[in-house]
Image (tube, rainbow, N blue to C red):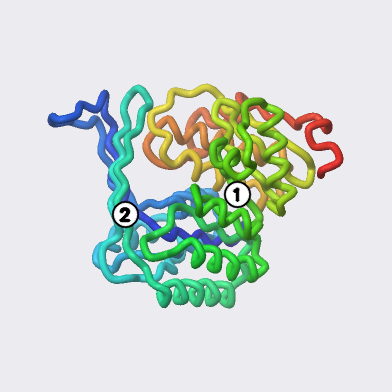
C-alpha cells in the first residue's frame, strides 16, 4: 500500500452530539455524544489507515491537551509527526439533528509563528528522508498566525519535494492553493464560481469550470457539486458520480472520506470509474452516522452498486484535455 503524509494545520477535538432537534435557550439531551481527535487531515488519515495505507500525520498540536490525539493516533496505527506548540488545541462542537441539519461551533485554533512553520517543514523533510511518500495532503483551515502569503510559501515548499500535493481547504486559502497548482483540489460550487469569475447555473457550466481548473495545472480537478454529486476532470477526460440515496444523519466528515477514497483508489492503481465510484460510495456511507466512512458497513457493496458514475461525452472537454 501507499505512504501518505496528512497535514492538518488547524486540528481540533470534535465534540459531536446527535439530537432529535436542537432547542435553543434550554437544556438539550443528545441521543449520542462522541469526543474525537479530528481535523480534516486527521479524518482523511483515519480512513486511509483503515484501508491499509502507511500514514503519517502532521501539523500543529497544543501541548496542553494532546493526550486524546496520542491515543487516537496509536489506535489508528499512524505515525505521529505533529509539531507541538504552546497552549491547547481547539475544541469544535457539532450538533447533528435527526433532520440532517448540522450546527458547527468551531474554536479559533491555536496560534503559530514563523519558527513553528519552519519546524513543520523540517519535520516533513525528515519524514521524506526516512522513507519516500506517494502523496502529501494539506487539509483544513488555517490557524491564527499563518497568513495567506505564508500558506502559499508552505505549499510551494511542499510541492517542490516532488511528491504529489493534494490540498483540501476553503475560501481565500483555496484560491491561494490553486495558484500553486497542486496535484488536486476540491472546491464546492460557490468556491469554483468565485475562482472562475462566473456563476455555475448549468451542468455544462460546472463541467467547463472544472475543466478550466484542470487547465490551470490541477491534474485532479474535483468539484463538489451538491445534488449533482462530484465532477472530476483529469487526463482521461471528465467524469461525474452521483451518490446513492441514504438517510443522512451527519455530513461532517463526508468530504474528508471522499478525499481519502480518491487517494486510495488512485494510489492503489484502480481505474478511474472504480476510483470515483469507491470514493463516492464511501462518502455516502459516512453521512449515515457520526464519523468517517467505513467499508465494513454490511451494505457497502450495495452502496457501490447504487453509485452512478458516468464518463462524460468528449464534447464537454474536446480540444482541452
| Relative image position of residue 38 (x, y in whole percent) | 38, 51
Q: Quadrant of the C terminus?
A: top right
Instruction: Give the vertical position of 91 relative to 194 (above or below).
Output: below
Mark closest to the chain's N terminus, 2 or 1: 2
- From this viewpoint, which residue is outermost toward the left? 26
| Relative image position of residue 164 (x, y in whole percent) | 65, 60
State the residue position of label 2: 108
Image quadrant assignment for residue 278: top right
Residue at 79% over, 43% down:
236
Q: How far is disc 2 from disc 1 in space, using C-alphas?
A: 24 Å
Instruction: Decide which of 100, 302 is in the foreground and name it.
Output: 100
Residue 222 appears left or right of 252: right
Instruction: Give the vertical position of 271 relative to 202 (above or below).
Output: below
Q: Tell me how many marks there are.
A: 2
State the residue position of label 1: 185
Residue at 49% over, 67% down:
150
In the picture, the disc for residue 209 is: none
Does dot 1 land on a helix, a strand or a loop?
A: strand
| Relative image position of residue 250 (x, y in whole percent) | 39, 33
Amino acid at each position: 500500500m501507499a505512504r501518505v503524509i496528512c497535514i492538518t494545520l488547524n486540528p481540533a477535538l470534535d465534540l459531536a452530539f446527535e439530537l432529535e432537534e436542537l432547542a435553543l435557550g434550554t437544556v438539550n439531551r443528545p441521543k449520542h455524544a462522541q469526543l474525537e481527535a479530528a481535523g480534516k487531515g486527521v479524518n482523511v488519515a483515519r480512513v486511509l489507515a483503515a484501508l491499509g495505507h502507511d500514514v503519517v500525520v502532521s501539523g500543529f498540536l497544543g501541548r496542553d491537551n494532546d493526550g486524546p490525539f496520542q491515543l487516537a493516533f496509536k489506535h489508528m496505527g499512524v505515525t505521529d509527526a505533529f509539531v507541538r506548540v504552546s497552549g491547547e488545541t481547539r475544541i469544535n462542537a457539532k450538533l447533528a439533528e435527526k433532520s440532517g441539519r448540522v450546527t458547527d461551533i468551531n474554536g479559533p485554533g491555536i496560534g503559530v509563528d514563523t519558527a513553528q512553520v519552519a519546524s513543520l517543514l523540517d519535520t516533513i523533510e525528515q519524514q521524506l528522508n526516512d522513507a519516500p511518500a506517494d502523496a502529501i495532503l494539506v487539509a483544513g483551515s488555517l490557524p491564527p498566525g499563518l497568513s495567506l502569503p505564508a500558506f502559499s510559501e508552505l505549499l510551494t515548499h511542499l510541492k517542490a519535494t516532488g511528491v504529489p500535493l493534494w490540498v483540501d481547504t476553503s475560501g481565500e486559502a483555496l484560491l491561494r492553493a490553486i495558484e500553486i497548482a497542486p496535484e488536486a483540489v476540491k472546491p464546492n460550487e460557490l468556491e469554483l464560481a468565485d475562482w472562475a469569475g462566473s456563476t455555475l447555473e448549468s451542468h455544462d457550466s460546472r463541467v467547463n469550470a472544472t475543466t478550466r481548473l484542470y487547465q490551470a495545472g490541477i491534474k485532479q480537478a474535483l468539484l463538489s457539486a451538491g445534488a449533482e454529486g462530484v465532477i472530476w476532470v483529469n487526463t482521461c477526460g471528465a467524469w461525474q458520480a452521483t451518490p446513492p440515496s441514504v438517510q443522512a444523519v451527519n455530513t461532517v466528515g463526508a468530504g474528508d472520506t471522499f478525499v481519502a477514497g480518491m487517494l486510495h483508489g488512485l494510489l492503489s492503481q484502480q481505474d478511474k470509474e472504480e476510483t470515483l465510484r469507491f470514493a463516492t460510495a464511501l462518502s455516502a456511507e459516512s453521512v449515515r452516522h457520526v464519523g468517517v466512512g467505513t467499508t465494513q458497513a454490511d451494505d457497502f457493496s450495495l452502496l457501490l452498486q447504487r453509485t452512478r458514475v458516468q464518463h462524460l461525452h468528449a464534447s464537454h472537454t474536446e480540444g482541452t484535455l
